Every structure is written in C-alpha cells, then in structure tokens.
Amino acid sequence: MQTRKPLYRYADGRVPNSLAMTYALLGYLAGLALLFPANGWLNALGTLLLAHAMIIAAYLIHEFAHGTIFSVPKHNQWAGNVSSWLAGSCYADFQDLRKKHMRHHVDRADVITFDSKAFLKARPVWFQKLVIALEWAYVPAVELIMHLYVIVLPFVTPNEKHRARRGKVARVMLIRALLFALLGWLSLKALALYALAWLLMVTVLRFADAYQHTYDAFAVLEDGQVPEDKPRDRAYEQLNTYSNVVSARWPSLNLLLLNFSYHNAHHEKPVAPWYRLPALHAELYGSAYNQVIPMRDLLGSFHRYRLRRVLDDDYGVVGEGPQKADGFYGAVGVSFLTAV
C-alpha cells in the first residue's frame, strides 16, 4: 500500500509556509479593499500592503519553483499559478518560469529569455531616450518591456511551442482586462493605486535582483547552451553571488523579502526553504563574510547607476571595506517573473 505524502515537504514548514501564503492572499485582499475609502491615510496603507503582499507572492513563486513548500510537485505548480495571478506574472507558464530559473542555478549564469539591452540598442533613438527618461524617473521601463514581451511573444513568433500559448494568453488578458475595467468602474482612484502598488512591487524586486550576482548574462531561448568560456564551478558561483540583506543588524527584517536576500546560502543549498536560510547563512559563513552587502550600502549605487544599467552589460565590481559596493553597477532585466 502506497504511503500518502504529507502536504508540506518539510514538517517544520507547516506554520511558516501557512502564515506566508495566508499573508499574501489576505494582504492582497485587504490592501485592495483599502484603496477605496475616501481617506488618504487608508489609501496609502492599502497601497503599501497590497504591494508587499504581491512581493511575498512573487517570492513564494520562487519557493514553489524550487519545490520547497509542498511535497507533491503538482501542488507547488498549482500554488505557483495562484501566486502568479497575485503578482501579475500569470501570462507565463509556471513550468517555463521554473525551467528558466533552474538553468540560472545549473549554468551559474543569468540565463535570460529576452535581451533587453540588445533590443533597446536596435530601436530608434527616440525610443531609447524615452526608456532612459522613464528609468531616470524611477519608472521600471525595462521590466515593463519584458512583461509586455511575455504577452506578445506567442503572437509574433513562428515558434510552435510559444504559438500554442496564444489561447491561454488571450484568455488571461481578457479576464484581467475585465477585472481591471470593473475596478476602474468602481473607482478610478483604486485602479491608479493598484497600478502604483504593482510598480512598487516591480521596483523592490528589481532592486533585490540587481545586486545578487555578477554572473555573465546570456539570452538563451529553449534549450540553447551557455558558452563554456570559463569554469563556472561552485567557487565561481559563491564569488559571484551576494547576500544583499535588508539588515545585518536586525535579521528579522529580511522576512520582508521572505529571506530571499540570503542569496549565498540559497545558492549553496537551493532546496533549503526560506525560513531556514538565516540559520543556514550563519552556519556556513558566520558574521563576517565579504559577500554580504546590506541594502543601505546599495541604495547609492542603485540611484547613481540607474541609467548605466539600462544599456551597459558590465555589472561592475565589488571591492573590499565599507565602500565595497560603490563600483557595483548592478543588473537589470533578470527577473524570474518574465520567463517564457
């Protein structure tokens, strides 16, 4: 007689995973409800709560992709699809997202679906200037282009696999358009604040993504291979991975990003669930580790190099000492939400 698998992959994951998923769902609904009252403070609270619920949903997608929450892969896929709807990344198939992200770990490279830099360099100057102007104003234009690419790809490519997704993408577009139309009919203010919350989510995710690697980036569609031009072993992986913690002094603040900032520990043991990463990081690296860069030390670089990142392939370098992140330009367009 076959033994029935437990719901959660790890026994110690029942409480933290249940809390995280409940927060993402209820925070989304509560934040959405707070966009409607004629009270600016409640609207502001609702926008921030909605944005943060989306952030947690996005990082839960990452956990589902690694299979760290449920013991049955199909359950991780179902939950990943639900989280994708909350985070607005539901136009891409969860399995495609998972496959592309696993290549990031296996190939030890930023394996991207869409080369935004090459795309922009091939566009008219006025379009490049528009994107640069939006990025100057902190509008995540590159990420918006990448999300749009996921939507339009099935309708413009001769690739049969992607063309087969036309029906699904069209249905998702129709459903979301109707829902947004209903939201706008109920309250144009709520619709605008919803868009702001989603942009806040994208900005937080791109800030976290920008400073977690100095990998080489490769635009690889389907099963294309990453060039074997250098040894990309585990030593390379750790030396080109950074733990951009929300706070080294108050580790609990890293829960705001579901501990995703403990990135060296995650890459050392990708099947370790999010709630174990702080202890795993302490066990592996202790309190003094050059790969740790608190986010407060990256805010200046995020601001100074926000235009350079748009077209420059160079991620910069990380040095030593208190100002080690001053030459760390960061990456752009490496979101795990935009894989196809």
Image (spheres, rainbow, N blue to C red):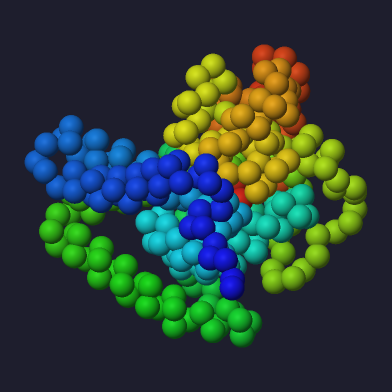
Residue 158 location, quadrant: bottom right
**Quadrant location, the N terminus:** bottom right
Q: Is residue 182 visible?
A: yes
Image: 46 above or below 163: above
Residue 330, percent from left and from top: 64, 37
Quadrant in which residue 123 is drawn = bottom right
Q: Is residue 115 depicted above or below 171 in this figure?
A: above
Q: Is residue 309 visible?
A: no
Q: Residue at the left extreme?
A: 38
Pinpoint residue 119: horizontal percent, then vertical percent: 62, 61
Query: Quick check: 68 above or below 219?
Result: above
- Position in image of residue 113 (x %, y %): 64, 62
- The mark total stands at 0
Q: Residue 59: give x, y in percent of width and height.
A: 50, 47
Q: Residue furthest top?
A: 322
Q: Nearer the viewer, residue 326 or 107?
A: 107
Quadrant of residue 120 within the rendered picture: bottom right
